[in-house]
Image (cartoon, rainbow, N blue to C red):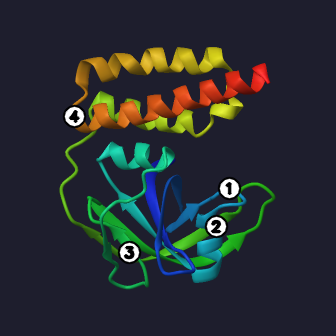
Amino acid sequence: MIQEIIVTTQNEDGSTHIAPMGIREENGLIMIAPFKPSATLENIQRNKSAVVNCIDDVRIFAGCITGRKDWSLVPTEKITGQRLTAALSHIELELDSFEDDGLRPQCYFKPVFEVTHFAFKGFNRAQSAVLEAAILVSRLSMLSEEKISQELEYLMIAIDKTAGENEKIAWQWLMEKIENYRQHKKESEIA
């Protein structure tokens, strides 16, 4: 099972890199498989640590995909780093092993500190739709226009029926990103 979370890692200059990612648990370890090249992978290789942030504010997922990465952070407890203030829970990780791959190396971490900050009350359908749309936006160049339109049409049902203010904001950011992608693609085809 893959869980969609936010990973925070420390950049070389001490700032924090924030990235949405899917993780898996395997034999008591947490596996993160960032794409090559990526800041997350570089930071993991340099620092041998990462933080898993479990959140329910889908603006953070949509924000990361659309270039909005200025989210409130607080220091971690056991590793050098920061976590999202909005995290419902977080897990501080130390790298246990690394399996290289040409596309997505697998980084296996042992949890060294885990705490719950707030109760998780569950996702509504709109929050799930925003997560799916964020994943879709991260793969725009790999999908046909027909597939993109079909997916968005279906996801829009949940937005229309169950979205609160945060979900509406996140959805709008993602739709702007898609529109910019479509416009750029159209201009490239004309040129």
What is the tally of numbered marks visible in this picture? 4
Mark number displayed over residue 41: 2
Circle 1/circle 2 CB separation < 8 Å: yes
Judging by the rendered image, the residue that carries numbered circle 1 is 35
Which badge, 1 or 2, comes first in the chain's sequence?
Answer: 1
Using the rendered image of the protein, determine whether residue 1 is visible from the camera's viewpoint: no
Q: Quadrant of the C terminus?
A: top right
Which of these two is toward me, 47 or 174?
174
Res. 83 in view: yes
Query: Marks 4 and 3, how far apart in space?
Result: 27 Å
Marks 4 and 2, Cα distance to the nearest angstrom?
Answer: 33 Å
Task: Please provide percent x and percent y for residue 27.
Answer: 54, 65
Kindly identify the residue that appears in the image at 25 percent across and 28 percent down.
163
Instruction: Name the kind of residue labelled 4 in the image.
Output: Glu
Q: Residue furthest front?
A: 191
Answer few, some or many: residues within 10 Å of disc 2's Cα (few below 14, many 20 plus, some between 14 and 19). many
Residue type pointed to by label 3:
Gln
Q: Position of residue 39 (x, y in %)?
A: 61, 65
> Dot 1: within a 10 Å radius of its alpha carbon, few (fewer than 14), some, or many (20 or more) residues?
some
Judged from the image, the secondary structure of the residue bearing numbered disc 2 is helix
Tell which circle, 1 or 3, labels the residue nearer the N-terminal end. Answer: 1
Specify the label residue 165 is tagged with: 4
Q: Which residue sits at x=48%, y=81%?
A: 14
Is 129 situated above or below 14? Answer: above
Quote the CA–CA distance across marks 4 and 1.
Answer: 32 Å
Label 4 close to label 2 by CB (< 8 Å)? no
What amino acid is at disc 1?
Answer: Phe
Q: Secondary structure at mark 3?
A: strand
Q: Residue at x 26, y 58 (%)?
A: 88
Q: Which residue is mark 3?
A: 82
In front: label 4 or label 3: 4
